[in-house]
């Protein structure tokens, strides 16, 4: 199975800060990497697909980059409503695995 | 709008069975693969199973293979997960989710989830 390692596991930042989360795959997954946002008590929501494509309706402060084994998710200017846990997910090989999540809090 | 609504969760004893359902609306259900994904309390996300649009191709995570059965009824726009020989570690919120088009990729949208608790 492909292991997805996110860092950090948790992050505290201030409103307006630039926030970066990384996701590393245990083998080359090309750009078959997606990012989700999950707010407490809610289902995950797709934000980024194929490493860098912004899902329709998602604010442009969210972005993704990377290919191969190393990927980055960025919030350019943190807003209070961005408080959530963020997950990466690969779909290069079955089983389609998720990272362990990054919990983002407001400082 | 596209909507997925799960039902069927509840409390079940170890070794017991449960059948989850997912009602789909707002899109042509028979054109899409569908999937189940679960999340144990306070934990991360775990993909469980895929079924192709016709039901002819099915994949399972090793953790549920031989115990869980995914199925669908395209006439009823419904997805199912039959869960047998349940274990404490199957306790989770179970989400149904839709991959894109006729292939496997991302999951969008997701249902609201249904909680399965396996405990004596």
Image (cartoon, rainbow, N blue to C red):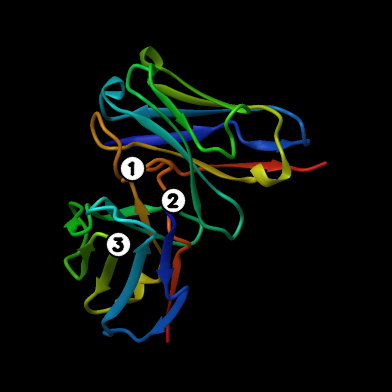
Label 1 crowd (10 A; few <14 / some 14-19 / many >=20): some
Of badges 2 and 3, nearer the viewer stands 3
Q: Which chain carries label 3?
A: A
Q: Mark 1 lies on which chain?
A: B
The image position of residue B36, as x and y in percent, is 47, 36
Read off the residue under disc 2: A43
The image position of residue B76, as x and y in percent, is 40, 16
Residue B118 visible to an observer of this rendering: yes
Tell me, yes or no, whether the two marked residues, 3 and 1, touch with CB atoms within 8 Å: no
Residue occupying image coordinates x 36% and y 65%: A24
**Do the residues at pointers 2 and 3 share their chain?**
yes
Please state if B78 lies on the left or on the right of A16 as rendered.
Answer: right
Q: In this view, does B52 lie above or below B9?
A: above
Residue farthest along the right direction in this orientation: B120
Q: How many labels does the image show?
A: 3
Residue occupying image coordinates x 43% and y 22%: B78
């Amino acid at each position: 199975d492909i292991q997805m390692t996110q860092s950090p596991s948790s992050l505290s930042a201030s409103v307006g800060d630039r926030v970066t989360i990384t996701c590393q795959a245990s083998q080359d997954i090309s750009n078959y990497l997606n990012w989700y946002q999950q707010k407490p008590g809610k289902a995950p929501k797709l934000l980024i697909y194929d490493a860098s494509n912004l899902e329709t309706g998602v604010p442009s402060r969210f972005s993704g980059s990377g290919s191969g084994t190393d990927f980055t998710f960025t919030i350019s200017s943190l807003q209070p409503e961005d408080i959530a846990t963020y997950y990466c997910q690969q779909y290069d090989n079955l089983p389609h695995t998720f990272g362990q999540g990054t919990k983002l809090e407001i400082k | 709008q596209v909507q997925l609504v799960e039902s069927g969760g509840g409390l079940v004893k170890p070794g017991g069975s449960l059948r989850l359902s997912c009602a789909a609306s707002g899109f042509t259900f028979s054109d899409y693969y569908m999937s189940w994904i679960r999340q144990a309390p306070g934990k991360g996300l775990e993909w469980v199973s895929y079924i192709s649009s016709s039901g002819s191709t099915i994949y399972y995570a090793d953790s549920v293979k031989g115990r869980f059965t995914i199925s669908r009824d395209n006439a009823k726009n419904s997805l199912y997960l039959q869960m047998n020989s349940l274990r404490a570690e199957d306790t989770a919120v179970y989400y149904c989710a839709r991959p894109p088009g006729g292939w496997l990729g991302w999951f969008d949208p997701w249902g609201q989830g249904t909680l399965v608790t396996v405990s004596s």
